[in-house]
Image (cartoon, rainbow, N blue to C red):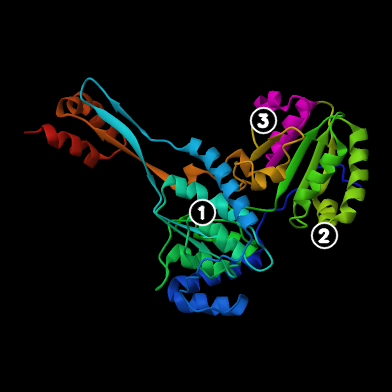
């Protein structure tokens, strides 16, 4: 299999058809609540009784529960370091200024149904929310299976609404007769779910609008082509729109990776998807030097960045834009998907230039406060009044002056 020798241009726009359909569904749910949610769920998903809370599942092996518990421990260990306590400044003149942190109160976690089954995403979305102190967390999914139910139980969540698609996003954002309004919606979904999240942003918060998965691997002539091929395919198997890029200083490495792709793909169950993905969105980029590789990488801002170079830690300072970074040949990206402890909910489509991986900071909000004694307000009185008048806001000025007119 030959990788393209050019950078793939990403098409991250939304189809007009999807945008219009989602807008119609959301408007209907906002206006008609439960009846609209049931109408679309009966049409697109497995029929259900509105407001049904699905009980937790237990029918999985003890070994798998142990895996979930171990992953939970890893994720908690990493994310606990993100906890902050705010601050307060007390001055000698009696002025007090500060900032306190409060958790978001209600969070909805969307979990895909059907053939998809991602208990890892349940952990990645719920554990940071729990650590942040979110009081009410519920899962929305069209067809909850036992694995997802047990993952929810491991995380301490016992509310699952059997609703999927854009109608689930609408129900969580607007609330219905039987479903409370949620303050934030997180979790992956198909194009309709992603577009629905984009459209309800502002009514509630969302984590991000995620696109197809991406991996970029920076390697030199010393890298193992067997590992590179395996890691490229680990992302390509998501779907045919996933992007897999190798960036290297070695033309020989590209040839060896292509041989490994041809060999390894034969034993994989999703080889047809992998092949389409690599043909459509896979490429190998030959660069003159590693500085150029990191320059290109920062411009692409990949979701996943693997550094398969000797002494990989020394290159961290060169990385400006990337969702999650995997250093060395024994830190493959799938480790981060499941067990390393870092979050796998990551910015895609170049948005790592301004978005961060999901974390505790996504489930908290900040409020600032200040206290000024009368004497200190008087010290600032003239400046504030003049500033307000300069902006033509004389009621602002009056708010200060009235306190000293007696």
The outermost residue toward the left is 406
Task: From the viewer's side, name the closer residue of 209 and 268.
Answer: 268
Which percent across, then down, holds residue 296? 74, 34
Task: From the viewer's side, name the closer residue of 4 and 213.
Answer: 213
Q: Is residue 70 visible?
A: yes
Query: What residue is pinned by disc 3?
Result: 319
- Tell me: residue 113, above or below residue 98: below
Q: Is residue 361 left or right of residue 112?
A: left
Residue name at image x 47 percent, y 77 percent: 50
Q: Is residue 280 left or right of residue 96?
A: right
Which comes sooner in the sequence, label 3 or label 2? 2
Which comes sooner in the sequence, label 3 or label 1? 1
Discs 3/1, front: 1
Which comes sooner in the sequence, label 2 or label 1? 1
Residue contact between numbered discs 3 and 2, judged by CB atoms under 8 Å: no
Q: Is the C terminus in the top left, top right, bottom left or bottom right quadrant?
A: top left
**Residue 155, which numbered label?**
1
Answer whether residue 194 is magenta in the image: no
Q: Residues within 10 Å of mark 2 (few under 14, many from 20)?
A: few
- Tell me which segment is drawn in magenta: 290-319
Q: CA distance from mark 2 to mark 1?
A: 30 Å
Q: Secondary structure at mark 2?
A: loop
Q: CA distance from mark 3 to mark 2?
A: 34 Å
Q: Residues within 10 Å of mark 1 (few under 14, many from 20)?
A: some
Q: Secondary structure at mark 1?
A: helix
Residue name at image x 47 percent, y 79 percent: 35
Residue contact between numbered discs 2 and 1, judged by CB atoms under 8 Å: no
Answer whether residue 294 is magenta in the image: yes
Which percent across, then down, holds residue 324? 65, 39
**Residue 269, which numbered label?**
2
Residue name at image x 88 percent, y 47 percent: 261
Q: Is residue 199 left or right of residue 293?
A: left
């Amino acid at each position: 299999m030959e990788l393209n020798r050019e950078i793939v241009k990403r098409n991250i726009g939304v189809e007009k058809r999807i945008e219009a359909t989602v807008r119609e569904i959301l408007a209907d749910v906002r206006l008609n609540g439960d009846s609209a949610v049931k109408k679309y769920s009966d049409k697109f998903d497995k029929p259900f009784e509105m407001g049904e809370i699905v009980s937790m599942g237990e029918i999985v092996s003890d070994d798998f529960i142990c895996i979930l518990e171990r992953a939970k421990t890893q994720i908690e260990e990493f994310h606990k370091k993100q906890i902050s306590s705010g601050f307060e400044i007390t001055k000698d003149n009696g002025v007090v200024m500060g900032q306190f942190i409060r958790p978001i109160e209600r969070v909805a976690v969307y979990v895909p149904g059907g053939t998809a089954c991602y208990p890892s995403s349940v952990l990645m979305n719920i554990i940071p929310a729990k650590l942040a102190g979110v009081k009410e967390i519920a899962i929305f999914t069209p067809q909850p299976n036992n694995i997802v139910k047990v993952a929810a139980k491991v995380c301490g969540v016992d509310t699952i609404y059997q609703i999927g698609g854009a109608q689930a996003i609408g129900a969580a954002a607007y609330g219905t007769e039987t479903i409370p309004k949620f303050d934030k919606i997180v979790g992956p979904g198909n194009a309709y779910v992603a577009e629905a999240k984009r459209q309800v942003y502002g009514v509630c918060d969302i984590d991000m609008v995620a696109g197809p998965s991406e991996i970029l691997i920076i390697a030199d002539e010393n890298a193992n082509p067997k590992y590179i091929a395996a890691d490229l395919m680990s992302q390509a198997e998501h779907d045919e729109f996933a992007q897999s890029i190798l960036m290297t200083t070695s033309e020989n490495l590209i040839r060896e990776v292509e041989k490994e792709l041809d060999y390894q793909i034969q034993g994989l169950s999703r080889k047809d998807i992998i092949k389409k993905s690599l043909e459509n969105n896979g490429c190998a980029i030959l660069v003159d030097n590693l500085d150029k590789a990191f320059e290109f990488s920062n411009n692409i801002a990949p979701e996943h960045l693997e550094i398969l170079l000797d002494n990989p830690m020394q290159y961290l300072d060169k990385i400006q834009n990337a969702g999650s970074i995997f250093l060395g040949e024994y830190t493959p990206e799938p480790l981060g998907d499941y067990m390393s402890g870092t979050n796998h909910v990551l910015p895609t489509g170049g948005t790592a230039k301004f978005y961060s991986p999901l974390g505790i900071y996504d489930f908290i909000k900040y409020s600032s406060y200040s206290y000024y004694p009368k004497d200190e307000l008087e010290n600032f009185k003239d400046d504030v009044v003049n500033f307000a008048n300069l902006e033509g806001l004389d009621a602002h000025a009056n708010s200060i002056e009235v306190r000293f007119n007696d």
